[in-house]
Amino acid sequence: MLKPPYRDTPDLRQAIIDACRDMNRQGINQGTSGNISARADDRMIITPSGIPYDRMTPDMLVSIPLDGLGKPEGPLPPSTEWQFHLALLQAKPEMHAIVHAHPVHCTALSINREEIPACHYMIALFGGNSVPLAGYALFGSEELAGEVVTAMRDRHGCLMANHGAVVAGETLEKGLWRLEELEVLARAYIISRSIGTPHILSDGEIDSVLGAVANYGLKTA
């Protein structure tokens, strides 16, 4: 398992590809709609646009300066969503990976323009008492990057209106794990609503969980 701070190496690039393949194997992404990036020194390494993961090789990934001032480097264009990946890595220096996909239950809630409230204590994994909803904007746009960064100002993930979901991770593994947990929460919330009225935990109840889950899950070191 690679540990941050990451360097732009073939191993890091392969780890990004492996995480993409894991998303599809686990059913939290379909086709090439998802994308993953990682911080590597002063650059962002991100998946290219429109390449099936089973055909992707490390040399296909794209390198972009984290300051946004240089041109992407690589044989292919970066993911169309590179702008919000870059904006999140700039806004969250403690995070080393961004994972985006279109998990079905997360996407269903995003289509309804709904956030996920504190229906389960695991909501605290995302930094607060909800997983917020980022406003709608055209995919790949600066406007969408702004909406996502605003929604995730004090959170580690959000839903994206009529689009999907995105999370930040202290490591690649933790980013993928966080997206898996987000889809489980979305599915449970939808099922709960189908059989009755969900009981939402209070802010005080979630506050008591936040400290307890600070180091929960995959370790970063």
Image (spheres, rainbow, N blue to C red):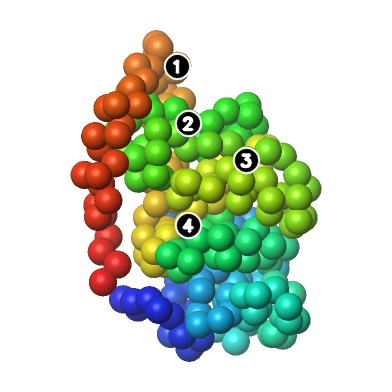
Query: What is the three-letter code of the residue carrying label 1?
Result: Ser
Q: Residue at x 35, y 17 (%)?
A: 199
Q: Quadrant of the C terminus?
A: bottom left
Q: Residue at x 47, y 46 (%)?
A: 155
Q: Which of 2 and 66 lies nearest the eye of the viewer?
A: 66
User: Which residue matches tag 4?
Assistant: 168
User: Which residue matches tag 1?
Assistant: 194
Picture layout, residue 163 above or below residue 94: above
Residue 49 placement (x, y as % from top left)? 70, 68
Residue 139 placement (x, y as % from top left)? 74, 52
User: Which residue matches tag 3?
Assistant: 134
Query: What is the three-letter code of the residue carrying label 2?
Result: Ile
- Residue 34 placement, left or right of 221: right
Q: Please tell me which of labels 2 and 4 falls first in the chain.
A: 2
Q: Please tell me which of labels 2 and 1 falls first in the chain.
A: 2
Q: Please tell me which of labels 1 and 4 falls first in the chain.
A: 4
Local crowd at mark 3 within 10 Å, few (<14), some, or many (≥20)? many
Q: Nearer the viewer, mark 3 or mark 1?
A: 3
